[in-house]
Each structure stands twice: as C-alpha cells, then as structure tokens.
Amino acid sequence: MEIDAPVAGRALVVIVDDRTAHGGSSNSTGPLVTELLDEAGFLVDATVVVAADEVEIRNALNTAVIGGVDLVISVGGTGVSPRDVTPDATADVLDRELLGISEAIRSSGLAAGALDAGLSRGLVGVSGSTLVVNLAGSRAAIRDGMATLTPLATHVIGELSGLAE
C-alpha cells in the first residue's frame, strides 16, 4: 500500500513574458519552477502566462490569492528595464512585505556569482494567507532562488496556517 507524501501546500506559478503571452515562442521556465515545487512537496494548481503589464500581473496574483493557494511564485519582470513591472504590481497585492526573504534570495544569487541578482527588485510578502514571491526569469536565478526560498516558504506557510510551532 502506497502512502502519499504530505503536501507542503498548493502553489500557482505566474510567468511574466511578453513573447509567450502574445503567442510567441514557448517559455521554458514554467516547467522548471513546477518541477522544483513538486520536488519540495508542493502541489502546483496551474501555470499562468501573462504579459509584462501591471494590470495583468496584479489580476493573476489576486486570482491566485482569492483561489486560496498557499504560495504564488511569479517569474520574470523583476529587473530595471521599463517593462520590468512585476514588483510594482506585486506591491499593490501585498498586505505585508517579508524583506528578509527577498534579501536572502538576492544575497544567495550574488554569492553564487549572478551579478544580475543585485539588480533584482523582486518582492516577497503575504497577501491574506498566501505567500507571494517574485523571482527573476533566468533559469539560474530560478534554481538558486527556489533553493533559498523552499525552507523559508514552508515555514511561512506553516505560520500562516497556524500549523508551525
């Protein structure tokens, strides 16, 4: 008899990518984030692709929060170019920002030699009972960010659900 492993929580992934959102080439970051979440014990409800537009990003994040997921991770749009508006949209959704986690993600990226990690404006915070995380869009940033995020996310989700000691 096989027993299912405990689920760390429900998650939703939001890919911020103009080309993919407008029918262009497929973005490969969604499957990577889903795989890493699955390895960490999360059940991924869906991956949503939106354009780099504040309203679209905000709507996707709000839909995830209203849908009751424990964790929503957005990927892309965290830098300094004019189209990098993910943190701006996220700020409108958050009830509380968790500066320590966003700084840990940036610091681990810099320590791994990813100089662009220092340019990330990605936010991490709580909206209702959902942890909301912005990750940069490169595969290296995703892998490094998820390695830093996973233990912290499971702790925060436990705190939000009242299950943490």
Image: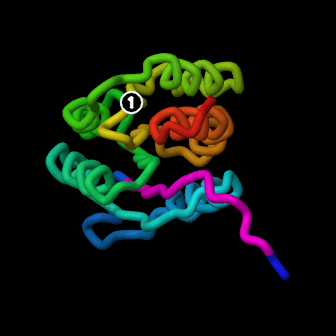
Left-right relation of 100 to 130? right
Percent position of residue 115, x then y? 58, 23
Q: Residue 114 or 86: which is nearer the viewer?
A: 86
| Residue closest to the far right | 1
Quadrant into which the C terminus falls: top right
Percent position of residue 158, x then y? 55, 38
The residue that mark 1 highlights is 125
Figure quadrant of residue 50: bottom left
Figure quadrant of residue 138: top right
Q: Residue 133 or 77: which is nearer the viewer?
A: 133
**Magenta-drawn segment:** 3-15
Figure quadrant of residue 85: top left
Say above or below: 36 vs 97: below
Which secondary structure, mark 1? strand
| Residue closest to the far left | 55
Left-right relation of 130 to 128? right
Q: Residue at x 65, y 44 (%)?
A: 143
